[in-house]
Image: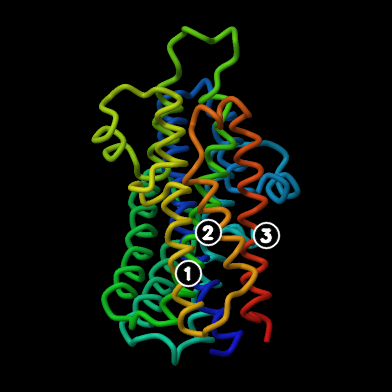
Amino acid sequence: MLGKTAGGLAWMFRYLERSENLARLVETGQRIALTRPDRAESEWASVLKTAGVTASYKAHHDDVTGEQVVDWILRGKDNHSSILNCIEGARMNARLVRTALTREVWEAVNECWMTLCSELSRKVIPRDLPRTLGVIKQRSAFVRGALHGTMLRNDIYDFARLGTFLERADATARLLDVKYYVLLPSAAGVGSTLDNAQWEMILRSVSAEGAFRMVHGRNRKPADIAKFLTLDSRMPRSLAFCYSKIGDNLGYLESDYGIRMPSHDMAEAMCQDLNHATIETIFENGLHQFLQNFLRRNGELAVQIELDYRFSQ
């Protein structure tokens, strides 16, 4: 496969995954802002930090308000990671690799783009925000469903999946890193009742409330939540799950092409580290340090995959 085709597939699905993650983030930010108006500004600042767009937002706005943050993340023209720009990027890459996609996948992407361009053509008022966010998540799911239901399991599928899980792992780690002070309360807060809204923020942002209750019941212990979202390979948005899939798809590429790349060794090392880690050791050494190291290595792996498979050529 041509490197540009491989890159187009990976980035098409990275952008789609990013748009869905951002929609979830805005949704949970709005819920907390409505239920805790006294902490609304800090929560919206937290949303910006999790999305990685604090610097670009502050370059265009003097203060942090819910209305401005929502508009910036949904459709800010100067925000390269806005949902609207992500969908534009996904469609642009889908056009680049059109011949590698089934008709159903292409149509799902194109319909996603047309629908969201219409939805985000003007500022979304608070009353319409839940419906708009639902449409964003639904359209991303349609593309993913078309991929799973119609695409041949070959290198095309593997690069699409690599893009999905590299982006998903990054999003989960960023969310946990921004909220790690909740998972690891200060000495002064030990023994106090932790903020349930913050727990909801963490679990809802990765659609994990129901799954967490199935495994751990209604007891929301810091160690249990951190373990569930980092090391539980059954949870589709955990770091361990994402890397099990990254490892699988890189393994299929190695088998198809008969070549083992440096990125394969990097992914294997990440998988082994996650498989052998314990939440006790992670907490002992520092959750923030663990997540920062993970984000760095995840980014390095993404760059190495681009080099190994010549995305720029």
The Cα atoms of the two marked residues, 3 and 1, are separated by: 18 Å
- Mark 3 or mark 2, which is nearer the start of the sequence? 2
**Residue located 58% across and 43% down the image:** 50
Snapshot colouring? rainbow
Image location (x, y in percent) of residue 242 = 45, 55
**Residue 205 versus residue 98 in the image, above or below:** above
The reply to whether dot 1 and dot 2 touch (C-beta < 8 Å) is: yes
Image location (x, y in percent) of residue 118 = 42, 68
Q: How many marks?
A: 3
Residue 89 located left or right of residue 137? right
- Tell me the kind of residue under disc 2: Glu
The reply to whether dot 3 and dot 1 touch (C-beta < 8 Å) is: no
The Cα atoms of the two marked residues, 2 and 3, are separated by: 13 Å
Q: Quadrant of the C terminus?
A: bottom right
Element under label 3? helix
Element under label 2? helix
Residue 233 located left or right of residue 41? left
- Mark 2 or mark 1, which is nearer the start of the sequence? 1
- Tell me the kind of residue under disc 3: Glu
Q: Count neighbours of disc 2 (C-alpha within 10 A) and say few if under 14, some if 14 to 19, many if 20 or more.
A: many
The disc label shown at residue 300, or none: 3
**Residue located 44% across and 30% down the image:** 32
- Write down the residue under mark 1: 13
The Cα atoms of the two marked residues, 1 and 2, are separated by: 8 Å
**Residue located 47% across and 8% down the image:** 192
Q: Nearer the viewer, mark 2 or mark 3?
A: 3
Q: Nearer the viewer, residue 149 or 45?
A: 149
- Mark 1 or mark 3, which is nearer the start of the sequence? 1
- Write down the residue under mark 2: 167
- Tell me the kind of residue under disc 1: Phe
Q: Count neighbours of disc 1 (C-alpha within 10 A) and say few if under 14, some if 14 to 19, many if 20 or more.
A: many
**Residue 6 versus residue 283 in the image, above or below:** below
